[in-house]
Image (cartoon, grey):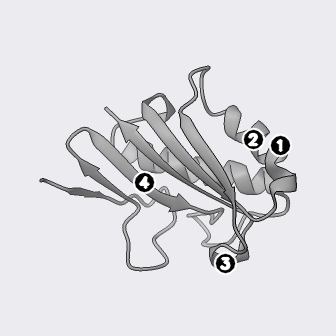
Amino acid sequence: MTKTIINTPGAPAPIGPYNQAILTGNMLFISGQVCIDPTTGELKNKDIQEETHQVMQNLKAVLHAAGMDFNNVIKTTIFITDMNRFAEVNEVYGKYFEGEFPARETVQVSALPKFVNVEISMVAVK
């Protein structure tokens, strides 16, 4: 199995021992992204909408680095610290897809890295 590591300055550098994404064959596995602005290294989290937009922009950058876009996404996992905020996250998330949504699960967790409210990972296929 051949693995290609995908790392781009358009998304935040990993904050642990992992890569932004791994491409194997025609499948791209993107590590969970949080709301770190890659240009400043700061969190963009004045509200959950801004936070979710930044997460999606980070995911978009990783997809583009692998020659893909949101149309290639087949599966997402959303981690959220408060399920009562689900509708707000869902509204922003949905704007990034052109009518064909991937499979998905959303789970509430007690905490996320850097104590953010949202983390999203993706699987995409060329």
Secondary structure beneath label 1:
helix
Q: CA distance from mark 3 to mark 4?
A: 19 Å
Secondary structure beneath label 2:
helix
Q: Are marks 3 and 1 in contact (CB under 8 Å)?
A: no
Q: Is residue 29 left or right of residue 41?
A: left
Residue bearing the label numbered 2: 90
Residue bearing the label numbered 1: 87
Q: Is residue 79 left or right of residue 67?
A: right
Is 126 rendered above or below residue 9? above
Is 108 rendered above or below residue 25? below
Secondary structure beneath label 3:
helix
Q: Are marks 1 and 2 in contact (CB under 8 Å)?
A: yes
Amino acid type of disc 2?
Asn
Q: CA distance from mark 2 to mark 3?
A: 21 Å
Q: Earlier in the sequence, mark 2 or mark 3?
A: 2
Residue at 53% across, 32% down: 102
Residue at 81% across, 61% down: 82
How many dots with numbers? 4
